Image: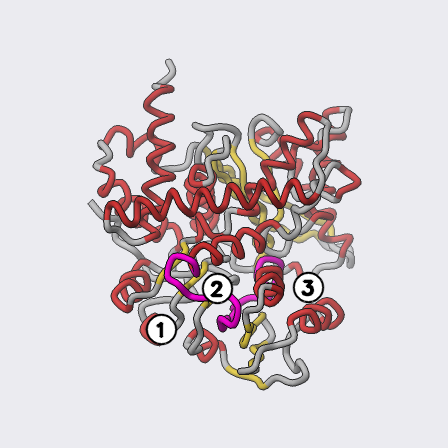
Amino acid sequence: MLTTVTAGNAYDVALENFDTAANALGLDQDTREMIKYPERILMVTVPVRMDDGHIHRFEAYRVQHSSVRGPAKGGIRYHPQVTLDEVKALATWMTWKCAVVNIPFGGAKGGITCDPKRMSQGELERMTRRYTSAILPIIGPEQDIPAPDVYTNPQTMAWIMDTYSMTKGYAVPGVVTGKPICLGGSLGRNEATGRGVFYTIECACEHIHIPLKGATVAVQGFGNAGSIAAQLLHDAGAKVIAVSDSTGCVYNRNGLNIPELIHMKVLCGHVEGFPESEPISPAELLAMDCDILVPAALENTVREDNAASVRARIIAEAANGPLTPAADRILERKGAFVIPDILCNAGGVTVSYFEWVQDEQHLFWEAQDIYNRLERVMKTSFRDVLKIHLDRNVPMRIAANMLGIGRVSEAVKIRGIYP
């Protein structure tokens, strides 16, 4: 039975995607009950003394969806629109994502409802440390391993690692991933998500016979994943003709100078007003006549009301949940090839796993070794999903969910129930 989706609710989307894949797998009801819902949900209040002396109370969450295949794994985001349902959805997707790329983690996610753009560095540090103290009983390198997400970064992870380590009395670098290199971070982690997006786009282009060199690309969202994917596509000879961030959208039919655009973004914090470009609307970017569309912003950006306008042949989901189920169905009818998020953006968690392994064994790898390992994982996973897509004649999203959910269901059946 399919879950009824509430418009705009990411968790309802996650549940509908689960039901669709579970039905295709013929999954029994007992197994569904064991793997569909989160294992643990922690809601905490985070009081923070702000710079002007007053105390502000933030609402925050940590959701552990599954630890069946290993420690829970997932990022922490700071955003004004963070809700419990969003965090539950993201934790659910992390479970299937880790299983799709076959790394021994389950899914988790965390978030604080705040506006980090309006907070000082000191306020962010105090909020992060208080939040870490609140979730400390349920995190750890063998239990739940946070990482960066929207508006969090290596500095945020350093504060979490330090707070956790101070309570233990010794350094515990493996409690988080995405750390600075000097604290046990991994080479290649910063660009891992965007690099994984690039590898899956390479595979998709090969599958549907689009030469990557000369292919036209639109990137919605020019943060870490979007900008690095754009840079790698540009380096491979693709033409990135449109890019957007939270400030606006820029367009050049002959291709934007991506290295210069990244430089401007770093210096100015926005892409708006980039030389040799013209402004366009967010709707125009999504409807761009191009070969590849990379949604790299937030959830539910392509919906039932705008999916029909999307003209890209390949949609590479660098963000989590950018397409709603209704949009999926419309794009499937249009013949678009969707690289689903739990495959497309799994490069980040894959290199997070590499970082955790390096921390646990106290031995670190060279950057090229990490790139080679990541490419093997992403391209093998793409082939695994593509095989289900072709053999079972199901959309790529259902195929990816079938692969991930199938691996988790196999693990839970073998483990059984204690006691």
| Relative side of 140 to 55, left or right | left
Q: Quadrant of residue 372?
A: top right
Quadrant (top left, top right, bottom left, bottom right) of the N terminus? top left
Specify how the rendered protein is coloured: secondary structure
Q: Residue at x 53, y 29 (%)?
A: 71
Q: Earlier in the sequence, mark 1 or mark 2?
A: 2
Q: Mark 3 points at which residue?
A: 118
| Relative side of 334 to 203, left or right | left
Q: Residue at x 52, y 53 (%)?
A: 199
User: How far apart are the two marked residues, 2 and 3, measured between alpha carbons?
Assistant: 26 Å
Residue 306 numbered mark, or none: 1
Magenta region includes residue 212:
yes
Residue 13 numbered mark, or none: none
Q: Name the residue under label 2.
A: 295
Q: Which residue is drawn at 28% across and 49% down?
A: 390
- Label 3: state its secondary structure: helix
Query: Which of labels 3 and 1 is toward the front?
Result: 1
Residue numbers of the magenta segment? 205-226
- Above or below for 317 versus 289: above
- For the residue pair 95 and 213, the one nearer the viewer reads as 213
The percent coordinates of residue 325 (x first, y second) are: 31, 58
